[in-house]
């Protein structure tokens, strides 16, 4: 089968299209013929081997996992022994992260997935290309929302509301009944309002950290701000969460320090590594079918254009998700 392969860490050019062995589903596994996948920040980080901590998972000197890609949508072509939850021909979508023994592999024509992994039948109203970007950014957003225990009526600010995580966060928050203020640039104000934001701040026209409103939670969906810049935005007992460790991994340190009584007036930093499971994918399926969530798509590329896709993602200018068409069908 064809796959996007990298055998060394580095820039997008280390990736090439090659013929590799087609996987065979083991007991309790299914074989998915991948029709669509994505390129995202996670793929870029593991391909580059940066930050260095990612190499603890994929190899210190050279990558042990040659085929990246964690989001996918496709059709089940074969099932292993004792599989009961899926049938050949089922249209499925999911996430091949670090849970349940699955590790990437979606940048290929075929992918073997555990039956109990992050996998579900597709929403009936989506194409493969629309379904593929439903899980990666969204599961980061969902983890942040659940970590902060956000509920109906909470005031939440989302910084970076046009990215894969931020655009999902706005929609997921509104589905819970939160009051959402989103931060983006001038060009995308209407787009973000269309996602459901109650209020939008144009960061090119004003410093969002000087906003007069106070929030129960600030979600930094792009990891470009900091707790110290955003602390004044928080109500007493308010929570700051970021999609990464922040400058010098300060968020990881502040997670330990900020809950101490009196240190930051009750305001604190929370950080949790996302966990993916089948319940998560089914939750997104329900939201999509109800109309409460629709993955935002920026650009589409073919598998043989994946290096160009990586380059675009790493400009930091993508809006929502970048989709890779793998198979011949997008329906």
Image (cartoon, rainbow, N blue to C red):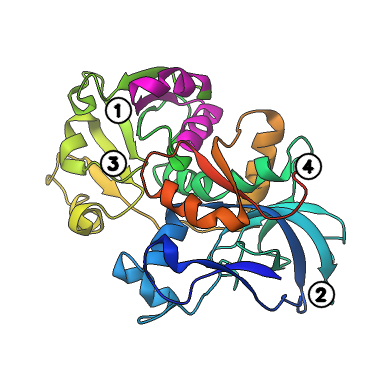
Q: Evaluate whether residue 123 shows in this view.
A: yes
State the CA–CA distance, disc 3 to disc 4: 40 Å
Residue at 76% from the left image edge and 77% from the top image edge: 24
Q: If you read the primary sequence from the N terminus, does the residue marked by circle 1 or circle 4 appear first? A: 1
Helix, strand or loop under label 4? loop
State the CA–CA distance, disc 2 to disc 4: 25 Å
State the CA–CA distance, disc 2 to disc 1: 49 Å
Number of the front mark, 2 or 4: 4
Give the answer, above or below, for where 244 lies relative to 124: below
Quarter of the image with the N terminus is bottom right
How packed mark 1 is, by other alpha carbons closer than 10 Å (few <14, some 14-19, many 20 or more), is many
Kindly identify which numbered label has been placed on residue 80: 2
Kindly identify which numbered label has been placed on residue 240: 3
Q: If you read the primary sequence from the N terminus, does the residue marked by circle 3 or circle 4 appear first? A: 3
| Region in magenta | 167-194
Helix, strand or loop under label 3? strand
State the CA–CA distance, disc 3 to disc 1: 10 Å
Q: Where is residue 136? Give x, y as percent.
A: 53, 50
Q: Evaluate whether residue 71 shows in this view.
A: no
Q: Main secondary structure of the magenta part?
A: helix
**Residue placed most toward the observer, 144 or 221:** 221
Kindly identify which numbered label has been placed on residue 215: 1
């Amino acid at each position: 089968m064809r796959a996007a392969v990298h055998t060394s860490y580095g820039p997008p050019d280390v990736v090439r299209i090659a013929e590799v062995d087609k996987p065979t589903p083991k007991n309790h596994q299914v074989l998915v013929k991948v029709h669509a996948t994505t390129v995202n920040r996670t793929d870029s980080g593991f391909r580059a081997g940066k930050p260095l901590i990612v190499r603890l998972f994929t190899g210190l000197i050279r990558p042990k996992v040659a085929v990246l890609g964690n989001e996918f949508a496709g059709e089940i072509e074969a099932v292993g022994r004792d599989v009961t939850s899926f049938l050949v021909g089922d249209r499925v979508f999911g996430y091949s992260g670090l849970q349940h023994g699955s590790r990437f592999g979606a940048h290929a024509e075929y992918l073997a997935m555990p039956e109990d992994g992050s996998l579900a039948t597709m929403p009936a109203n989506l194409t493969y290309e629309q379904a593929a970007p439903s899980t990666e950014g969204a599961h980061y957003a969902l983890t942040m929302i659940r970590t902060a225990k956000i509920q109906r009526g909470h005031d939440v600010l989302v910084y970076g509301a046009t990215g894969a995580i931020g655009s999902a966060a706005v929609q997921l928050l509104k589905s819970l009944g939160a009051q959402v203020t989103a931060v983006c640039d001038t060009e995308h104000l209407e787009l973000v309002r269309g996602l459901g934001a109650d209020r939008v701040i144009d960061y090119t026209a004003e410093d969002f950290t000087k906003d007069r409103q106070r929030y129960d939670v600030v979600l930094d969906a792009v990891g470009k701000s900091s707790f110290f810049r955003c602390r004044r935005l928080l109500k007493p007992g308010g929570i700051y969460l970021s999609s990464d460790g922040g400058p010098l991994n300060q968020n990881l340190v502040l997670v330990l320090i900020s809950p101490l009584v009196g240190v930051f007036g009750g305001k604190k930093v929370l950080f949790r590594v996302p966990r993916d499971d089948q319940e998560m994918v089914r939750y997104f399926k329900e939201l999509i079918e109800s109309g409460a969530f629709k993955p935002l798509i920026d650009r589409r590329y073919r598998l043989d254009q994946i290096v160009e896709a990586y380059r675009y993602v790493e400009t930091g200018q993508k809006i929502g998700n970048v989709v890779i068409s793998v198979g011949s069908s997008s329906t």
